[in-house]
Image (cartoon, grey):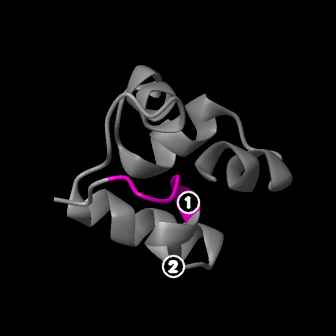
Amino acid sequence: MLSDARKERGMTQLDLAIKLGVHPATVSEWERGLSLPQPRFRKELARIFGCHPFDLFRDGESWG
C-alpha cells in the first residue's frame, strides 16, 4: 500500500507531495482510499517506489 511504501523509504506525506507537485492533503486522501491518483501520478508513484501501480492501492479499487 502507498503509506507502507512511503514509510519504508522514510518519506513523509509532505516529502511525497513535493516530489509529485501536489498538496500533502492529496497524498493523505490517496492513502486513506478517499480518492485515487490520476494516471500520470500512478506512473510516477510506481517509478518512485519501484513497483507496479496496483501494488500501492487496495485490491478491488477502480482504476477508471
48 to 29, vertically: above or below: below
Answer yes or no: do the residues labelled 1 and 2 have beta carbons within 8 Å?
Answer: no
Name the residue tied to disc 2: 52
Q: Secondary structure at mark 2?
A: loop
**Distance CA(mark 1)–CA(mark 2):** 7 Å
Q: Secondary structure at mark 1?
A: helix
Q: What amino acid is labelled 2 in the image?
A: His
Q: Nearer the viewer, residue 61 or 21?
A: 61
Name the residue tied to disc 1: 56
Specify the farthest residue to the top. Answer: 25
Q: What residue is drawn where x is 27% and y is 55%?
A: 62
Give x and y (percent) for residue 58: 53, 52
Q: What amino acid is labelled 1 in the image?
A: Leu
Q: What residue is drawn where x is 48% and y is 50%?
A: 19
Quadrant placement of the C terminus: bottom left
12 to 25, vertically: above or below: below
Q: Could you tell me what secondary structure mostly forms the magenta stretch? A: loop
Q: What residue is drawn where x is 61% and y is 39%?
A: 15
Q: Can residue 57 be found in the magenta stretch?
A: yes
Give x and y (percent) for residue 46: 50, 72
Displayed quadrant of residue 25: top left
Q: Nearer the viewer, residue 18 or 2?
A: 2
Q: Can residue 59 be found in the magenta stretch?
A: yes
49 to 13, vertically: above or below: below
Q: Which residues are magenta?
A: 56-61
Give x and y (percent) for residue 33: 44, 34
